[in-house]
């Protein structure tokens, strides 16, 4: 978007015709440098986040979050300026065209005439509509023949800027939503890395040394199962001895062996 705004034919032809120090020239450069900065920050944030996810590095993830936060703040500022003064770019471009048109009418053989023709050929327009009583013979001269059937240049510039503005507003809204999601995701990953939870379940495990002569400890579930079975066998043996009585306790094992 920044490259289209700076190197596009419609913006470039107005920029070449704009005098030094004009408001449009400053806005044109500001839009280009802002777009390049946002693209660089977004690329840097994506690279840092990807590296932090692979290496599980807190510092890299914090750097990615900072880049996304800066992009979000800049996009918020752009959206605020767009909402607060939506006609700022349009007024600056129309003022530049008015200056070129007036100077071209006053000196038809000068360089302004060539710049005016370049603007009209780019926007496919000619002149600007005005009441017939306010137009002189020299001012009506730029639009003759087939060029007179073209639309008004002021209206053509407005239509182009409205289309470009809608595209820019859509991209700004998508960028704000994407940066908000990126900040939430990077903050979640940062907390996950800081809490020691490995994302890929990698890591080293150490076994605690066992004292000499101590049997290995079994899991708690198996210990409880074995204890329950032992108690069950003891209770069955006690019930059997009680049924046999004291007189038959000596012969009990032989009977059990025979059975």
Image (cartoon, rainbow, N blue to C red):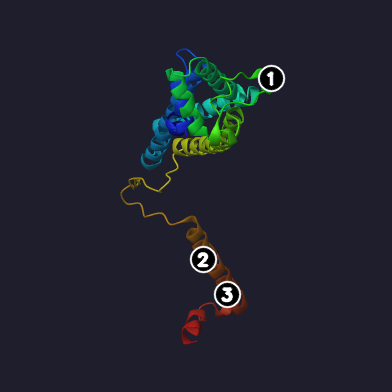
Q: Label 1: how many residues lie within 10 Å, few (<14), some (14-19) or many (20+)? A: few
Q: Position of residue 51 (x, y in %)?
A: 37, 38
Closer-to-camera residue (114/209)? 114
**Left or right: 137 in relation to 66:** right
Q: Which residue is mark 1?
A: 133
The answer to whether residue 132 is above or below residue 241 is above
Q: Position of residue 123 (x, y in %)?
A: 52, 33
Q: Can residue 29 be seen by looking at this rendering?
A: no
Q: Which residue is mark 3?
A: 241
Closer-to-camera residue (161/236)? 161
Whichever of callouts 1 and 2 sits on the residue coming sooner in the sequence is 1
Seen as rendered, the residue at the extreme bottom is: 258
**Left or right: 67 in relation to 232:** left
Which type of secondary structure does the marked residue at label 3 adopt? Answer: helix
Which residue is rendered at x = 48% and y = 61% of the image? Answer: 222
Say whether marks 1 and 3 touch (CB < 8 Å): no
Give the image quarter of residue 89: top right
**Left or right: 186 in relation to 153:** left
């Amino acid at each position: 978007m920044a490259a289209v705004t700076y190197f596009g034919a419609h913006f470039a032809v107005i920029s070449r015709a704009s005098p030094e120090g004009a408001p449009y020239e400053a806005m044109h450069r500001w839009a280009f440098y802002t777009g390049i900065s946002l693209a660089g920050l977004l690329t840097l944030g994506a690279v840092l986040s990807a590296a932090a996810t692979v290496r599980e590095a807190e510092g890299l993830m914090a750097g990615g979050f900072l880049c996304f936060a800066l992009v979000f703040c800049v996009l918020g500022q752009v959206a605020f300026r767009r909402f607060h003064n939506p006609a700022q770019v349009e007024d600056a471009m129309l003022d530049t065209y008015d200056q070129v048109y007036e100077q071209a009418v006053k000196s038809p053989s000068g360089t302004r005439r060539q710049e005016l023709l370049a603007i009209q050929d780019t926007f496919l327009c000619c002149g600007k509509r005005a009441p017939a009583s306010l137009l002189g013979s020299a001012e009506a001269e730029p639009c003759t023949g087939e060029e007179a059937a073209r639309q008004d240049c002021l209206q053509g510039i407005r239509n182009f800027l409205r289309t470009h503005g809608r595209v820019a507003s859509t991209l700004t809204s998508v960028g704000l939503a994407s940066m908000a999601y990126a900040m939430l995701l990077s903050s979640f990953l940062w907390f996950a890395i800081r809490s020691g939870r490995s994302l890929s379940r990698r890591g080293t495990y150490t076994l605690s040394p066992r004292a000499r002569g101590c049997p290995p400890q079994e899991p708690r579930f198996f210990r409880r199962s074995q204890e329950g079975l032992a108690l069950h066998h003891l209770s069955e043996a006690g019930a059997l001895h009680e049924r046999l009585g004291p007189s038959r306790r000596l012969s009990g094992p032989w009977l059990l062996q025979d059975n």
